[in-house]
Amino acid sequence: MKYLMLFLIPTMIFPRFSGTDKPVYNCGLSHTANKILNNKSTLTPDQQKIDISYYKLDLEILIDERIIGGTLVVRGDFRTDQPDLIELDLSSAMSVDSVKFFGEVWPFEHDNHILKIPTLQITMHGGYDFSVEIFYGGTPIPSGFGSFNFDTYNGEDHVWTLSEPYGARDWWPCKDDPSDKADSVDIIVTVPSEQIVVSNGLLVNEQSLPDGKKLYHWAERYPICTYLVAISVYPYVFWSDYYIGINGDTLPLEYYVYPDHYEMVYENYMLTKDMMEVFAQKFGEYPF
């Protein structure tokens, strides 16, 4: 039986604009919209020579200190010519502790929002695979629609991301351009145990840790742009349902909502499977 997962996360995607404890500012103001929409790709010549296939982001979020820290593993290959540098986008507000190239501690430079990892010490050719591990941390400075935010809702701590169009670099090292989708991404996040982490793909592990912490591991196995990699952290109410497709396949439906929204949205969200049936009849089954 085909096993697919759909996540509908109400109030997660745009939490900043509805019900926040903080003042609400209209992001539709023309000057703000123009600033965001006029952002352009920042691909460097060396970035154009690499093709990213995989990211593994493993973070701990220290909510009280408003700090994140952890590791990023990135794998890819050289398209044709060997670049002088493996260059990844990462805000200069974040600090890089060290870099490993195939497990060896490696020199690097982090300047002007670019992490530069030299390749000249070795000779590689087109199609050559590489693997880099980056140890980093800091307090992200939001850009665009918010990118990474330490927030509150109803007096509870709330961390959320919204990285369009080029805000992923604000909180994790990546080739931050929609022209290069990773084939798969693992997102591992450790938070205080009272919190719940929601992210892309399927939740494959939920593990209690010492010192009042909890680890969540989400796995995305479809190609994905960096700006769509997202996390939301809050003590959500969770429930699940399922949709049976026209062909008999079952699609689990999982919902994470603010506790005070549960009564308000439950009946409406339970119509999701009926809506999907209509769309399936008109356009075909949900493909992911």
Image: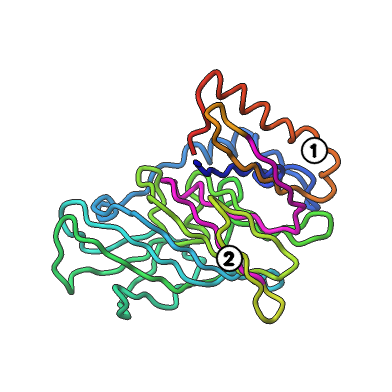
User: In this view of the protein, can residue 61 be seen by the observer?
Assistant: no
Secondary element at tag 1: helix
Q: Foreground residue, 128 or 206?
A: 206
| Image-based side of 254 in relation to 18, left or right | left
Q: Mark 2: give few (<14), some (14-19) or many (20+) Cα within 10 Å.
A: many
Residue 234 appears at what percent x and percent y?
A: 72, 58
Residue 143 in picture, x, y percent from top left: 56, 51
Q: What kind of secondary structure does the magenta stretch mostly adopt? A: strand
Bounds of the magenta segment: 214-243
Q: Is 144 left or right of 210, judged from the image as shown?
A: left
Residue 177: give x, y in percent of width and height: 39, 47
Quadrant of the image occupied by residue 243: top right
The residue that label 1 is drawn on is 265
Q: Is residue 232 magenta?
A: yes
* Disc number placed over residue 189 in the picture, else none: 2
> Residue 223 — which label?
none
